[in-house]
Every structure is written in C-alpha cells, then in structure tokens.
Image (cartoon, coloured by chain):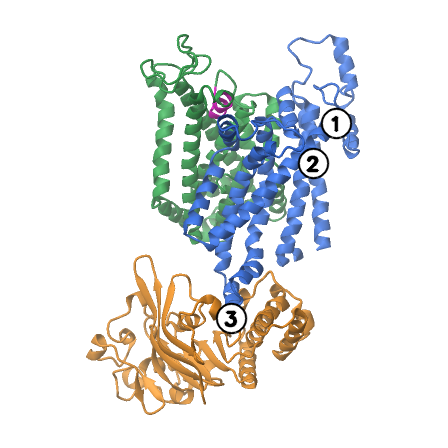
Chain colours: A orange, B blue, C green
Amino acid sequence: MANVLVVDNLDVTFALHQSEVKAVSDLDFTLAEGETLAVVGESGSGKSQAFLSIMGLLARNGKASGRAMLGDVNLIGMAPDKLDNYRGKDIAMIFQDPMTSLNPTLRVKTQLAEVLVRHQGFTAEKAHRAVIEMLERVGIPEPVKRANAYPHELSGGMRQRVMIAMALLCKPRVLIADEPTTALDVTVQAQMLDLFKNLTNDFGTALVLITHDLGVVAGVADRMMVMYGGRCIEKGPTDTLFYDPRHPYTLGLLHSTPHVAKRAKRLDPIQGLPPSLEHLPRGCAFHPRCAFRFERCFEERPPLLPVEDVREKACWYQGELKYEAVA
Amino acid sequence: MFGYALRRVLTAIPIVLITITVCFFILRLAPGGPFDGERALPPDVMKNLRAHYNLDQPLISQYFIYLGGVFRGDFGPSMVMEDFSVSRLISIGLPFTLMLGFSAFVVGTVAGMIAGAVAAVQQNKWPDYLLVAIVLIGIIIPNFLMANLVQLFFGVYLRWLPVGGYQPGSIAHLVLPVLILSLPHGGRVARLVRGSMIEVLGTNYVRTARSKGLGTRLILARHALKPALLPVVSYLGPGLSYLLTGSLVVEQVFALPGIGKYFISAALNRDYGLVLGTTILYVFIILALNLIVDVLYAWLDPKVRYR
Amino acid sequence: MAGITGKDAALTAYANALATEAPKGRSLTQDALRRLFNNKAALVSIFVLTAIVLFALVGPYFLPWAYDKIDWAGIRKPPDWAKGHYFGTDQNGRDMLARTLQGTQMSLLVAGVATFVSVVIGILYGAIAGYFGGKIDAVMMRFVDIMYALPYILFVIILVVIFGRSPVLLFVGIGCLEWLTMARIVRGQTLSIKQREFIEAAKAGGAGPFTIIFRHIVPNLTGPVVIYATLTIPEIIITESFLSYLGLGVQEPQTSLGTLISFGAPVAEALPWMLFTPAAILVTMLLCLSYLGDGLRDALDPKDR
C-alpha cells in the first residue's frame, strides 16, 4: 500500500523566556493508506505537539523543522494560507476536549457547513444537506434538530460525534485523533472507537490515534509507535508490541494498564515521573526509571534501530525482558 | 429570546419606581429649600409659594401627585427658573444630550473595537504599544482636565475649532466634545477587546477552526469576534454611566445646551424639582439602555438565554 | 467616577477566585503581593506616591507662604524664585505651590476617609450577606447588582444638594456609594472562610453570628481590604476633583486639586501656571495609582499576562 504521510526528521522546539525546549526530536514514521497508527506515550512525551506541528497549529512560540510529506507536498514550514488548502480537506484533526473545541456561539450546522463551503465550494444549501447526512452517519439521532442546536445543548459524546463528522466531511486522506475518548464516559468510549474504525474503513482514511491508554489501542490500531521524552522509542505492529515488547518502557506501560496486565496477575506501575523536557537526563531519557539499565544507558543515547524486519526500538539492553526477574 | 427580554423589562420597572420614591423623599425631607434665600420672604408670600408648588399638602399626597405627573410626562415646575416647567427644560436639553452621548458612544465603541482587535492580532508589535499608550492617556487624565487642555490647544492656541457653544447643524462645534467624551470610553473598550481577543485566539475552538483550514479572515470574523465582544457588551452598561458623568463635564466646559447643564445648575441652586426630574430621566435612560445591552448580550451568548 | 483602574472587573474576578479556591484565601493574597513587588513600574509608582504624600503633608511647613496668605505685591505673577513663589501666584496673590499642596492634602484626605467609609460599609454588608447566605444573601446581592447599574454620580450630587457643600459630608457621601465592590469581595471571602474548621469550632463554642463575623471573619480580610483600598483611592480622587470642578465639592478658602483646576482652567491662556501646577500633580498621582492598580491586577490574575 502507498504511504499517504511520510514524516522525516521532525523537530519541534518552543522558545521560552531565556531557553528553548525541544518537545519532539528527530521523529520519523510513515502512514499507509487506510491504516491505523496508534501513538502512545505519557503526557509530555511530545506526541500531541508532533501532530499539532504537522497541522501548523503550534502555539506562537513553537517552531517545527523537518519534513511531513502529505502525498508530494511538505506541510512543515508551509505558509498558513497555503496550508489552509490542505487542512480540513486532506488532513483533519480531532481534539481531546469536545467541550471546548466547538465554538459556543455558533450553531452546529454553521460550524460543519463552513468546511464544505471552504473546501468543496458547496452552496450553503447543499452544504447543509450534506451536514445532516454526515450527522446521521456518525450516529446522531434527530440530525436536523441537532444541527440547529448550539454546542452546549449537546452531551459530551454527542459533541465528539459532531467533531468526528466535522473532520470527515471532506473524506480526508489522514485523520489525526488526539485523545478522542479521554474526556468521555467509559461506555461512550467503546462506541466512539467502533465509530472511528467503521468510518475510516468506509472512507479509506488513514487514522492516527494519539492516546496514553493502551486499552484503546488494542482492538483498533494496526501499528503502534511509543514515544518517550520527545522521541520514538519503539515502533511495530500492535500485536507484536503487545505480546512481545522489546523496550522496557513499553513493557512498563503494558504492565500498568489494567486489562492488558491481567496476564501478569498484578499491576506494576512504572516507578518515578516522566522527565521534564527542559531537563532531559543524559544518555537514554528513560534510564532513571528503567529496571534494566547499565552503564552505557547513563552516557549514550540509544538510536532507533531495526529489530527483526518490521520492528524498531531504541534501547541498549538486548537481553530478555522479564519483570519478575528484576522486581 | 423574546421571553428573556420581557423578563428583563419587568425587573427594570420596580427599579425605576424605587429610584423615584427614594429620591423624592430624600429631597423633600432634606433641610433647607430653594426659598431659603438670604432675605427671609414675607410669610404670606411664602404661603402662596408653598401652595403653588403643593408643598402645603401632606408629603404622601405630594408624592402621589408627583408620581401621577411623571407617568404623564410632567415632572412638575422648576422651583428656581420660575417660568419653566421641568418637562419644558428637559425637552429643550434632552435631544442635544442624547445626540452628543450617542455620537460619543458610537465613535468610542467602534474605534475602540477596531483598535483593540488590531492590537490583539499585532500583539507586542508597534500598533499594540501605540494603542496601549493612547488608552493610558485617555483613561488617566480626568475628562474635565482633558477637556480644558484640548480646548486650550485646539481652540485658543491653534484656533482650529470653536472654543465652545453650539450652533445647530455645526459639526465643528461637536468635534471636541465628542472627542473628549469618546476618548475614555473608547480606551476602555479597546483595552477590553484587546484582552478578550487575545484570550479567544488561544481557545480550543479557534484551534479547531484553524484545523479546518478556514483562513485568518473568516476565523476572525466568524469564530473570534462574537465571543471576544462578550466582555465589551457587558462593559457597555457601566460604560453608559461613565458617559453620562462625562457629559455633565463636557456640557459644562464647552457651554453646550444639554440637560447636564440644567442638572448642575439645579444642584448648585438647590432646585429640587429640576434635580429630581433630571435624575429620574437619567436613571430611566440608563436602565433602558442597559436593557438593550442585556438583550444584545443574550444574542451573543446563547447560554444566557436559558438562565 | 468608577472604572478608571478597571477595579470592578479585576476585583470581582478576585472575589470569585477567593470563593471558589476556598481554603487558600490567604496564600492567594500573599502570592499576589509577592508578584506585585516584582513589578518595577508598580514599585516606582509606590515610591513616587509616597514622595508626593510626604511632600503634601510636610512641605507647607518649609514654604515661605501659607496657602491663604495674600502677597499684595505679587498678584497674578509667574514663578519667581527670589520671592519664594516657586510656581507663581493666583489672581488673589496667593502662592500656587502652597495652594496645590493644600489641595493635594484635601484630595488625599477625602480619598482616605471615603475609602475608609466604603470599606466599613462593604465589610459589614458583604459579611452579613455571605455569613447568613440563602435568601438574605440573594436579596442583598441582587440589590448590589441593581446599584451597579445606576449612575452613582447622580446620587452623590443629590447628597451634595441636600447636605450642602461641606467636605465632611462629601467624604461620607462618596464613601456611602463606593462600597459595592467591597461588599462583593467580602461576601466571596466570607463564603469561603465560613466553610473552615475554626468557624465550626467557634459555633460549637456557642458564639453568635456577629461574634463570629467580627472575631473570625473580619480579621481574615486584611489582604483584600488593602488591595481594594489601593484601587479605590484614585477613583475617589477623580470623583472629588470632578465634583469640586463642577463647584459641588470643596469650597474656598479651602481648596482641592479639582477646585484649583476649575479656577485655573478659565485663565489658563494668561496664567498657565494656575492650571498646570495642580494638573501635573493630579495626573502624576493618577498615573502612579494606575500603574499600581495594573500591577495589582496582574498580581491577582497571573494568567492574564
């Protein structure tokens, strides 16, 4: 399958008062047509900032470099008015908090229809009909009535469905969903993931699912990328990472996720706190919390290297990962 | 929306009534009056005067006579300017004051909004700094002082504009008064718009709008402007009170024929009838305009309508 | 003339913060003061203000002319250092510097007393509303909302009309109408303090509502009161000078900055020093108080920066 998004050497830095902080360092990945990629990491691992930079949505003090090729155009460093020809049309994004991500002063249909008017040149009337259709598609009952509602009149799940409808209106090639279920009730979360799966399948849209919840990843993602301290530390097909993690951090994540850790009989949370990006440790960023560390980890940062043919990891430790042995 | 407006009207009526009642009794119960001149008046003259102004009746019936009059638009006689009724004086001064206030309100609000929005988009660049400086001057220097300074500068030294007075239809006579009245108002509006615009541009829903590829102009006009105006609209209510206060000064300094001038001279002469009448009128205007502002707010913020 | 420092908005936000972040009331205020002292503009303003106040209080003892002393040889004269009229004289031959200092004293006195009155009323009103809560609170705060909508300068003028133009009544009258924001803050603070254990303990010990309010709630209000007063003083200085300017305030032979400006304005073309001396002092004070207010507002609401 062809790649729709190829990211090369992506760096994201933020200028602070006197210093600079590197939120994302040297990130490479590809996204194939129609595939689902899960991006996993704790908060502050740079996973959201990486994708905000691809969308051109960094905060004022943020700066991205590298390449993010959507087809044959590079989105990084593109002028905002040119970027607007792709954002919302070929690449769309859904945000974590559906409560604040919709404009409270505009009706739902206005916020949806403007996408079609902007990118497809629809007339207002045609756009409204397409909006109602799409709202029905994402499972909103009484779509005509809801389309006329203001966001505060809808429940959280309903709002996230509106966000999904908004993102999919132009049948984008890539959809980035940043923690799309975190703010929702557990019962709604499962429905929402089903919806994602079905719709992206139907539209042939490639999905990037940014999350810190491995439970969300399990049933949905084809491939998985684990991030720590602004870098990718392990990458590969979801199944192999789940059953045979090769990086101690991935192992730790699996052991701290309740329904995944069932096999291990008990929860083993990772010790310590995620590092501050301003003061990343020398060597491997994970070494202060790692149970498998040795001298080399303190001094040298491990590069991301292939293991077997479809997997990559960034870790010096080459032995078998067994928690019981250490804990 | 209509129900909301109706509820607001119904709550405003008792406020007007209470204001009339409180002001009436305070003024009537106060020691001294317009006839306590330096020379004592002969008793029978005094008696006639009191009868003429209904002052010999019990206070409570005076109150109802007055209240009845107010409903018919009759604010009773002026006690110092003998040949004029309060209503007559008001009808002379009110159109001018409203015209002055309305011009200043429109000029200040529009200029303030534009300046504030520009400053927000150009945050920390020179247009922003320029605006902050002008706003500071406009707000810091009290308008009676500012009025005198511009009068001195443009009227006396440069002789570009008339020093004061008013001729119907003359725009030149209105330039300085409107400038002085709109400067602090516009300054506060600009400050508010700048702050709220910066805040709105950082919200999640503006980020959503950007992610949809809508383009800066559409985002500003459709997504940012309405919510950014909310704090401005809620300021307009108190802002009207400041405009009123300012109009008292401006009418005085530029010798303009508005009700502010009557109000001040009535206060200096202890002309209770005129003070009471103008106060009621001011309160009524302020409340009516506040009502409009509230309804406008409900239109801008759909959540308010359901409260 | 309220609103010069944006006080109402800033302090209402502060009151809300106090009410919602319940038990942290004190440290919120301490944080605010710490941030204030890191603000250079605010520190310079405090310094200049202190200098003006000291000069207004002490200066007259060192001047060759008293504020009401007439120099028959120097009527309507520009500044003259040899004679000791450093800022000239007015039409009656009185020294402008001495008069300006006396006017500054008067303006500060009015501001101080009126602020005190408004703080007292605001504390009582807000503490009662917040402490008793429920319907009493709803009615009392609704009244405050209504008062906010009314143009309070009209009522000040009515009070002046009724009681005549005595400065004492001017203080009290302005103070009686400036307490609204204070009441809101105190109510918010009271609501949060009410939840704390020591109030429970006092109640269990049989203390009545007013004992609790005065012994336990009022002493906890020091921070908000200091901040409120700083922001209220410039507004009262403006109100006072506004009224005096219109002839409704301080009367001859006493004087205030507003009175001086109103006498200086009509003759400013011929005798500019009569307008510019009091105007410069007034604007400097207001500018400093405004920077101080801005500093306080930033200190109270750090996310605003």
User: Is residue B272 visible in this depiction of the protein?
Assistant: yes
Above or below for B236 versus B1: above
Q: Whole-percent x and y of residue C292?
A: 41, 40
Q: Is residue A234 left or right of residue A211?
A: left
Q: Which residue is mark 3?
A: A183
Which numbered tag is attached to residue B88? 1
Query: Foreground mark, 1 or 2?
Result: 1
In front here: A80 or A21?
A80
Q: Which residue is mark 2?
A: B18
For the record, the magenta segment spans C255-263
Under mark 1, the amino acid is Arg
Q: Main secondary structure of the magenta part?
A: helix
Query: Foreground mark, 3 or 1?
Result: 1
Q: Residue at x 77, y 20 (%)?
A: B53
Image mark 1: chain: B
Image quadrant occupied by the C terminus of chain A: bottom left
